[in-house]
Image (cartoon, rainbow, N blue to C red):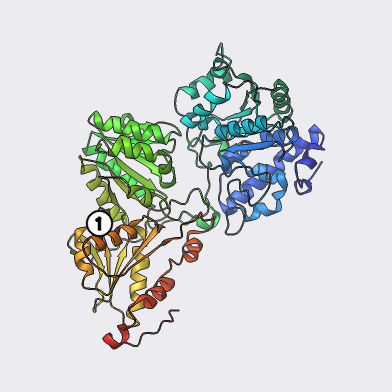
Amino acid sequence: MPRLEEIRGPEDLRALSPAAARALAPQIRRLLVDTCTANGGHLGPNLGVVELSIALHRVFDSPRDRILWDTGHQAYVHKILTGRTAALATLRRTDGLSGYPSRAESEHDVIENSHASTSLSWADGLARANALLGRDDRAVVAVLGDGALTGGMAWEALNNIAAAPERPVVMVLNDNGRSYAPTAGAVAGHLAELRAGDAPQTLFESLGLRYVGPVDGHDIEAVEAALREAVALRRPVVVHCVTEKGRGHLPAEQDDTDRFHAVRAASARTPGGAPSWTSVFGGELAELAADRPDVVAVTAAMLDPTGLGDFARRHPERVIDVGIAEQHAVTAAAGLALGGMHPVVALYSTFLNRAFDQLLMDVALHRAPVTFVLDRAGVTGDDGPSHNGMWDLSLLNLVPGLRLAAPRDAATLRRALREAVACDDGPTALRFPKGSSGADIPAVEVHAGLDVLRRGGRPDILLVSVGAMAATCLDVAGLLAERGVGVTVVDPRWIKPVPPGLTGLATDHLLVATVEDSGRVGGAGASVAQALSEAGSDLPVHVFGIPQRFLEHGSRADLLEAGGLTPRRLAHALLEALPSGWRARRGAAASLAVG
């Protein structure tokens, strides 16, 4: 029997006998469990696609045949089978393997697909390109989870693919009945009928597509036969593979809460301590809803990951899971608001990107009282470039009439949520990062609507802290105080619109600096600079934030360090930014060397 480390690429896999190929499956599962336990990662989805991935690489000749993964978090086995077994030990670590397909890693990773429901559109485009260029010697294969079929983009693509029976596309439907939680909507019910053999005709056949299945997705030879049948048809085909999420790992198989969908690294599992931002939000919303029967929670297939589990248990009739369909979630929320409810739409920050038009034209244009709660805002770390929530401030600052809060701790999150839900004349949004909410940071005073976190004696620098960067800004102020620099640290809490009191307070200082864990272009700092300019101020404004580029995966600490957002690097930059005559005027002898 072969050893997994002997598989250096798909050609080695195709040379194996069926029995030898089957022998790889338990080895792969052991490696997945060991790696995800140590590093964190999407364990459940990958345990479920072991045999399916083996069959795909035995039938198709990657990378000539294009295999597209939707979503990419189910591609760990694909990485193993394409020569990255040894490197899997570095999964999701800084400078290691990405948790999603990465074109920088391998020619077998065709698209860096980590947002769901997009693979069929990619496949349609690739199939059209093959037809236009006369390339009839290669296949286009899209592997999508059943949860991806809850996204509207998948159906837009199916509408086009089905209209061209002469263009072959193999659509492998990995049906495990779940995205995070059980898959939502009528399509899930139809797939259940297909699994049970109760449907007289498939929805896919009604569209003019061929259908092969259902196939046991854990039977390598059965999947291979179905894939070869699909290729031979030379037209668009859906191959329906039924799999079990978490297959082969008893704790995952017996768990129905999806704790094993994505597991945390062993080093990150620390008992006790401050609650997570997510749990603080979820607990407060459930409490708030007990007093507000008009509050409705909306999720896009991520009930527990966005903290809505407690809400669902206490108010089950007022929680709505629309599936992986952020655009629908936002416009449906506008409809709920029109009908007299106050919807709270809970999303990861990065997924709001997909529904910006709906937020702008359906919610804001109609001044609908909808509250958006954006988890995983800023630097999220090991999930990689698609999941760092660094775009929300830039996008939300474009939206007329929207009010935006960035709480600095658990106490201000609870307060901001209640203030947001109290707004009945337009949309509101809250953003917070991944992880622990940390210790509460009390204000030493409130000045013109701003929370003042520190007064630094002489007013040299006004340091505007945005959200979770408060502790960092206080550390910066402490370092600068040691060098004779007076720093006032303020937290606006509500950063859109810019509080009027901020411009008045700024006039007492030599310069203004803003610190945010968001993109520098169009973010909170840019808004502060614009507000000061419009108020007639010529004070220099220094904006510190995430560099405007896609950030690779790594720890939050590593990425903040790379972006210059650590106390010592910020303090050094601010010392250099002080006016040239500062020492003479202040009589100070501060050194520019910090640390």
Task: Determine which quarter of the picture holds residue 470.
Answer: bottom left
- Image: 409 above or below 373: below
| SS of the residue under disc 1 | loop
Q: Nearer the viewer, residue 34 or 70?
A: 70
* Residue type of the residue flagged with mark 1: Val
Most distant residue in the left direction: 448
Q: Mark 1 packing: few (<14 Cα in 10 Å), some, or many (20+)?
A: many
In the rendered structure, the answer to whether residue 136 lies left or right of residue 260 reads right
What is the total number of numbered labels drawn onto the structure image?
A: 1
Q: Residue at x 48, y 59 (%)?
A: 556
In the rendered structure, the answer to whether residue 538 lies left or right of residue 565 reads left
Q: Position of residue 330 (x, y in %)?
A: 35, 35
Q: Position of residue 306 (x, y in %)?
A: 40, 43
Q: Quadrant of the N terminus?
A: top right
Disc 1 designates what residue?
A: 498
Can residue 312 be seen by looking at this rendering? no
